[in-house]
Image (cartoon, rainbow, N blue to C red):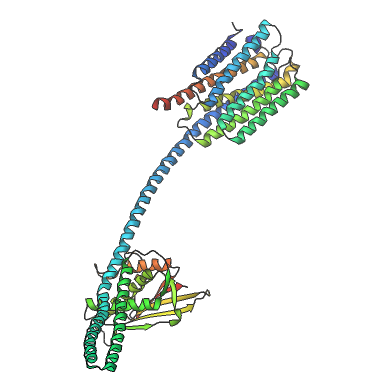
Amino acid sequence: MMHLLSLNSAEVTIFLVAGIILIGLFLGFILYYIFTYRDKQKAYLLLESQNKEIENNKKVIENTLIDLKATQTQLIQSEKMASLGELTAGIAHEIQNPLNFVNNFSEVNKELLDEMVEELKKGNTEDAISIAKDIVDNEAKINHHGKRADTIVKGMLQHSRNNSGQKEPTDVNALADEYLRLAYHGLRAKDKSFNATMQTDFDESIGVINIVPQEIGRVILNLITNAFYVVNEKKKQLLEGYEPTVTVATKKIINPSGSNVVTISVADNGNGIPQKVLDKIFQPFFTTKPTGQGTGLGLSLSYDIVKAHGGELKVETKEGEGSEFVIILPI
Amino acid sequence: MFSDFPHSLYYGILFIGALTGLLLYSRVSAPFKSVALLLLVTLVNELVARYFKYQLRISNNPVYHIFTVIEYLLYAIIYSQFFKSKKWKQILFVTVLLLVFWEGINLAFFQQITKSNTNTLLLESLLLVILSLNLFLKIRTDMEHGNLLSMGSLWFNAGVLLYYAVAILIWGFHSLKVYELQDPPRIIYTLLLLFNTLLYSLFVVSICLDAFSQKKPKSAS
């Protein structure tokens, strides 16, 4: 070995120095690699644990979302039932009218039939025929009012049923009119002192439009019920010359973008909505009614229903003068 | 049995490496099976080379001309098993072709069969340093293993990088200077031999570590 080292030429010296530098460099690289890998690995493990945590949180959130959706479904159902409760008195009143007609006309018919038998016995055929015509007319009226009761019951069932979400051609004027009367009679049945003027201004050119009638009906009912509530509240303030009025109007218009829309507006001359709560009225569970009187879901669900129809639900209000809610539906 | 301590150490480690590879062959993963095969082939090559030199008393350089190509082919297989991707398999295939082509050119024009094929060894070393650096990058990117120091591929790759980086210098020096020197500086080759011993020692370590890490899931199951 010593003999080999004695070959100390310039090239060998350069070579050895270069070799040592090279070895040092690569050893340094490997050591640097190992140490920085540890740091990176720590960061990686931290990231991995954070990812796991995020994954766990995601699962928790997903489960919470499922629970929330279930709760939302229950709340929607509760809101439906609540509105159905509000309607019950109105429905009873509305059914009572045709039932009265049916009972009265059937009693009259019974009497007319007796008379007809008497006339036939007497041989007064012409009188008998005249009475028979009256019976036929009454029968038509009985049939008409029976159908009316049938329509009301079907409407009530539709209101409470889980709708299929299928749109169908619907006469919005008839829908709005029906819910206006149901809401009014419902409130009247609960509070005999309640009274309000109902005004309607329906645009007959609308005809039928494609909507989910149960859903839009629920929205209209909610807006009308709210309107009656606020005018009644204002009436309680015993303001002189105040005449509580709720106006329901429909209109077919062309909006600024050029497409046809139908508007259904529910206006009241109540106290209006204070500016500070105006931004919150469509939020779920927001209510100005006393505890136990409102779920705070009515306007929120109404907003969602109208949005689902591709429409808009707008509100215009003036404090002390009243509010107007406008449903804008594309056709 | 061998001329000096560095040689005795070198052959001893090579023998232990080949034996370890054979014993742990069934336990190790695919790349380390190839490493075991490389150690065995290297041992056979060295024994044949010694036989040429000391028994037949003829130049053993022809053995190294053949061995260099076989050795690089085995390295290419090992790296393709580490990289796993089709792109790398294609690249490695091209480098094998390049090396074979270069060996042919070298044989024909520069270093005949009876001379040391340092030009080919230089190219092989260069390619292996590049592959080694890329594997380091892959290990860092993949982060597949919990403890880096227990990774067989780390020690295998560190050995390749260290040895072949030094080899570039040595074969380069040889290709440029040896023919001008009457008495080549053997210290350089002793240094190379020691690094070669280190390389095969690290191969043994990597095989053992891989066998140990492969054993765990078996016992767990």
Give the residue at the far right of this rendering: B109
x%, y% of residue A318?
37, 78
Q: Tell me if A295 is positioned left or right of B36 in this view.
A: left
Q: Tell me if B37 is positioned left or right of B148 in this view.
A: right
Front residue (pair B167, A325): A325
Q: Is residue A280 at all visible to an observer of this figure? A: no
Q: Quadrant of the N terminus of chain A?
A: top right
Front residue (pair B111, A41): B111
Residue at 28 percent of width and 66 percent of height: A81
x%, y% of residue B106?
74, 22
Front residue (pair A181, B110): A181
Residue at 28 percent of width and 92 percent of height: A125
Q: Is residue B1 above or below residue B202?
A: above
Q: Is residue A210 at all visible to an observer of this figure? A: yes
Residue at 60 percent of width and 35 percent of height: B86
Image quadrant of residue B5? Answer: top right
x%, y% of residue A233?
26, 78
Q: Tell me if B202 is positioned left or right of A309 in this view.
A: right
